[in-house]
Amino acid sequence: MESVTNGMPATGIEGADWRKSRRSNPSGNCVELAVLSDGGVAVRNSRFASGPALIYTHDEMAAFVQGAKDGDFDDLLRRD
C-alpha cells in the first residue's frame, strides 16, 4: 500500500479519481476531492493539480461537510 501523506504532490497519489462539484465555475477554479484506499479524502486545488494535497480522515471530512450544510462557514463567503 502506498504511503499518502499530507502535503505530498496530488499527482503522486496513485489511482486517485479526482472529483469536483457540479457547481464549479466554467473556468475550472475549484476544489477537487479523491477518496483514498483507507477511507480518507485527499483535497487539491484544481488550478494547481500537481500542487500539494491535504489529507483528511473520513470523520474529519464528514464533520466539515455537515458544518457546511449547517451554514457554519457562510460568513467566510461574504464579499463586503
Image (cartoon, grey):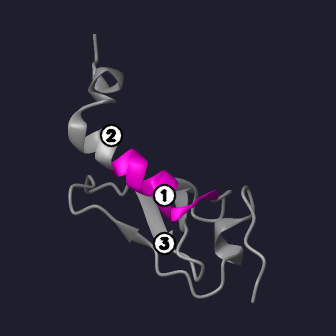
Q: Amino acid at mark 1?
A: Asp
Q: Are marks 1 and 2 in contact (CB under 8 Å)?
A: no
Q: Amino acid at mark 3?
A: Ala
Which label sits on residue 59? 1
Residue situated in front as seen by the camera: 78 or 67: 67
Which label sits on residue 16? none
Magenta run includes residue 60: yes
Q: Earlier in the sequence, mark 1 or mark 2?
A: 1
In this rendering, the label closer to the viewer, 1 or 3? 1
> SS class of the residue under badge 2?
helix
> SS class of the residue under badge 1?
helix
Does any portion of residue 34 appear in the rendered image? yes
Along the horizontal axis of the image, is 27 left or right of 5?
A: left
Which label sits on residue 34? 3
Q: Position of residue 74 (x, y in %)?
A: 27, 27
User: Which residue is drawn at the image coordinates 45% and 65% (left, top)?
Assistant: 33
Magenta run includes residue 69: no
Q: Which residues are magenta?
A: 54-65
Q: Position of residue 28 (x, y in %)?
A: 36, 57
Q: Which residue is mark 2?
A: 67
Specify the farthest residue to the top.
80
User: Which residue is drawn at the image coordinates 57% and 64% (left, top)?
Assistant: 49
In this rendering, the label closer to the viewer, 2 or 3? 2
User: Which residue is drawn at the image coordinates 68% and 57% (left, top)?
Assistant: 52
> SS class of the residue under badge 3?
strand
Sort mark 2 into few (<14), some (14-19) or many (20+) by Cα contacts within 10 Å. few
Residue situated in front as seen by the camera: 4 or 19: 4
**Magenta residues, dominant SS class:** helix
Q: Earlier in the sequence, mark 1 or mark 3?
A: 3
Q: Amino acid at mark 2?
A: Gly
Q: Earlier in the sequence, mark 2 or mark 3?
A: 3
